[in-house]
Image (cartoon, helix red, strand yellow):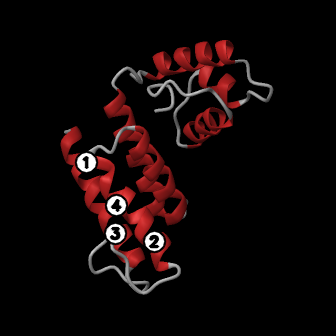
Amino acid sequence: MHRALNRIVDGQWIEWAASMLEKGLDSYHLRILAGETPPYFQSELISLADKTFEELGLNWSDTERAVRRYAAELLADLLAGTREAASVLKSLKDLCLEMKRPPYLYDFYMLHYALLDLKEEENTPYWSGAHPSNIFRIITDTARIWLEGFERDRK
């Protein structure tokens, strides 16, 4: 996803490569990318990332598809309990803004701000019916429904 958005190669790319190895993906260049350490040289890492994507059959030229896949990965991690809701929502909110608020990310943008409000208030204008007692259920239900739609659309 970072490559599709032409982002600077940084430690997140290295973390991504390591997490892909942990999830069972493997390739020669993925292993090299996962082992990179600072200082990062952009041209070398971009070339390495491109070779990795080619080896893994990952097409980064379709930005929306790459963003949706990344969102699915974050939401799956949220539901698995390996990422915190606040962190996932912040990442998706930032991505939503960067992508100029596409409808498929907008609920997570709103939930990010609802969660922030509900840390200090009893109500929020960002999500109707959300309260401190039910916000995490709303977040997980929304993530589950989004992922079900994502999986259905992939078939």
Q: Is residue 16 left or right of residue 155?
A: right
The CA distance from mark 2 to mark 1 is 19 Å
**Of the residues under marks 2 and 4, which one precedes in the sequence?**
2
Relative to residue 11, is residue 101 depicted above or below? below
Residue under the image location 34 percent in, 61 percent down: 143
Q: Secondary structure at mark 3?
A: loop
**Of the residues under marks 3 and 1, which one precedes in the sequence?**
1
Q: Which quadrant of the rendered structure holds the C terminus?
A: top left
Q: Nearer the viewer, mark 4 or mark 1?
A: 1
Mark 1 neighbour density, 10 Å: few (under 14) some (14–19) many (20 or more): few
Q: Secondary structure at mark 1?
A: helix
Amino acid type assigned to the residue bearing label 2 in the image: Leu
Mark 4 neighbour density, 10 Å: few (under 14) some (14–19) many (20 or more): many
The residue where tag 1 is placed is: 103
Amino acid type assigned to the residue bearing label 4 in the image: Ala
Decide if residue 81 is in sight here: no
Give coordinates of residue 79: x percent, y percent.
43, 63
The CA distance from mark 4 to mark 1 is 14 Å
Amino acid type assigned to the residue bearing label 3 in the image: Tyr
